[in-house]
């Protein structure tokens, strides 16, 4: 009973639920923002990495390698605490969105590169024979085929980014984890943290299953 009263106190969970929902709204907004900007930035990096001039290719490779190696927490702390010393200040939400987007962009660039390089050179040659400009070839021929390859790993990266939104609590952004921590301190009971964990599970588990479904579908399509 002591375990249940401490970690699974129903009355405290009900009382803290509105607080957790406010945090959930901020978490969803942060995750969607980071995913949109991170994917766009990653596709841009991929194009530079594959088809840019030599200097810009090496610059993109350097960026991708660095931000795939750096923990998101380090990037977030640098943006939120170090940049103000140079006169550049962002809110906690903006700092978290930038940090998550920068890291997701690096991983997205590699996923997109793998997808594009999976397309045979014959597709490029056929498009060139038809007189299609490069960007038209990418938009109408290459990318539609590459999407089938990149969707499963890209979806998996997006799920990881949603989990990493919990790091925004470090810079006092009122996300789901920060709200749960505040509710725990207010009610002197860890039940709100269990509630936050259940909410994370409720909206991330379907996404995890979606990744598995997309991977299985991709394998079936490749086997045909």
Image (cartoon, rainbow, N blue to C red):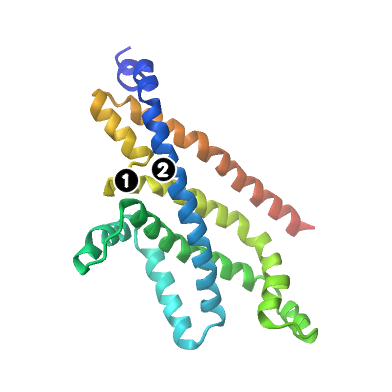
Residue 211: image x %, image y %? 60, 48
Residue at 33% x, 48% y: name it: 168
Instruction: Work out which residue is located at the far left of the displayed protein and give it.
Output: 85
Residue at 75% x, 79% y: name it: 122
Residue 186 in which image quadrant: top left
Closer to the chain start, of discs 2 and 1, is 2
Residue 141: image x %, image y %? 73, 72
Residue at 56% x, 57% y: name it: 154
Question: CB under 8 Å between callouts 2 and 1?
Answer: yes
Q: Secondary structure at mark 1?
A: loop
Does residue 179 sit above or below 108 in this rendering?
above
Q: Which residue is mark 1?
A: 173
How packed mark 1 is, by other alpha carbons closer than 10 Å (few <14, some 14-19, many 20 or more), is many
Structural distance between the alpha carbons of marks 2 and 1: 8 Å
Instruction: Work out which residue is located at the far top of the displayed protein and give it.
Output: 1
Residue 48: image x %, image y %? 52, 78
Q: Secondary structure at mark 2?
A: helix
- Please state the total of marks drawn on the protein image: 2
**Which quadrant, please, contains the C terminus?**
bottom right
Residue at 29% x, 61% y: name it: 79
**Which quadrant, please, contains the N terminus?**
top left
Relative to the observer, which residue lies in front, 140 or 207?
140
Q: Which residue is mark 2?
A: 26
């Amino acid at each position: 009973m002591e375990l249940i009263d401490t970690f699974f106190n129903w009355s405290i969970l009900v009382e803290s639920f509105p607080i957790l929902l406010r945090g959930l709204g901020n978490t969803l907004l942060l995750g969607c923002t980071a995913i949109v900007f991170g994917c766009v930035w990653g596709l841009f990096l991929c194009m530079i990495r594959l088809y840019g001039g030599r200097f810009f290719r090496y610059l993109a490779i350097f960026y991708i390698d660095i931000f795939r190696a750096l923990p998101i927490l380090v990037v977030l702390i640098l943006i939120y605490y170090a940049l103000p010393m140079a006169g550049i200040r962002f809110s906690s939400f903006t700092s978290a969105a930038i940090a998550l987007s920068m890291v997701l962009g690096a991983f997205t660039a590699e996923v997109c590169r793998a997808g594009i390089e999976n397309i045979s050179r014959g597709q490029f040659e056929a498009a060139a024979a038809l007189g299609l400009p490069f960007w038209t070839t990418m938009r109408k021929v290459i990318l539609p085929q590459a999407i089938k390859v990149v969707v499963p790993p890209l979806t998996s990266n997006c799920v990881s980014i949603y989990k990493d939104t919990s790091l925004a609590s470090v810079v006092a952004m009122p996300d789901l984890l920060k709200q749960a921590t505040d509710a725990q301190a207010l009610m002197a009971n860890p039940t709100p943290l269990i509630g936050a964990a259940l909410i994370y599970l409720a909206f991330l588990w379907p996404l995890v299953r979606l990744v598995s479904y997309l991977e299985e579908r991709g394998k079936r399509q490749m086997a045909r």
